[in-house]
Amino acid sequence: MSNPIEHLWLYNDWANKSVISIIKSHGSIIPPSCLRLMSHIVNAQIIWLSRLNGEKPYLGVWDEHSIMECEQYHNLASDGLGEKIKKHNDYDKHNIQYKNTKNDKFVNSIEEILLHTFNHGTYHRAQIATEMRKNGLEPVSTDYIVFVRKQH
């Protein structure tokens, strides 16, 4: 197995692509809340990637997108996060200074930021699954163990 951070990045990529795919396949019957949450997931990934790169984020945390835009933003963010992971083997030793959306200053390690980003996606994918179920739709399973089983 790859290192744990890289493995979580691969899982996050797979899980987001799975949710994007199911949203695309259901089209207009998907509750708007699902697309709003998927937009939020990709926005957060872009925002954290921007912070890791020392750049000002160009998306708002709750900006809403079409599913095709979500897919594009996800791919951009996932590729960028993957590059960061492959570039740094000692994430916990590299600190990043950044400002949050309230303009408060913080310092966290790359590892902490990556773990937060991937955990954040998991939280909101579960909300999407709940919204789908409440609206009579069967969500895709994005459980970590499902991802692991697909790797064997």
Image (cartoon, rainbow, N blue to C red):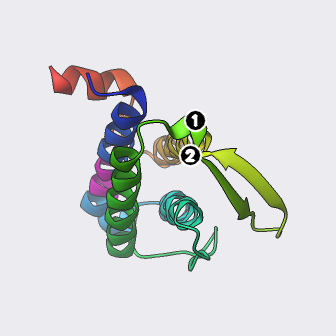
* Residue in the image at 83% along x and 68% along y: 102
Looking at the magenta stretch, what is its main secondary structure?
helix
> In the image, is 65 to the left or to the right of 99?
left
- Residue pointed to by mark 2: 110
> In the image, is 98 to the left or to the right of 1?
right
Q: Kindly indicate the quadrant of the structure image that contains residue 88.
A: top left
Residue 134 at x, y percent in the picture: 53, 44
Q: Kindly indicate the quadrant of the structure image that contains residue 136.
A: top left
Q: Residue furthest bottom?
A: 58
* Residue in the image at 50% along x and 42% along y: 118
The answer to whether residue 115 is visible is no
Please report whichever mark, 1 or 2, sits nearer to the chain's N-terminal start.
1
Q: Which of 150 and 79 is in front in this view?
A: 79
Q: Which of 19 and 117 is in front in this view?
A: 117
The answer to whether residue 6 is visible is yes
* Residue in the image at 56% along x and 80% along y: 58
Range of magenta residues: 17-23
* Residue in the image at 39% along x and 42% along y: 12
Residue 9 at x, y percent in the picture: 38, 41
Q: Of the numbered discs in the image, which one, if any, rests on residue 92? A: 1
Answer whether labels 1 and 2 touch (C-beta < 8 Å): yes
Amino acid type, callout 1: Asp
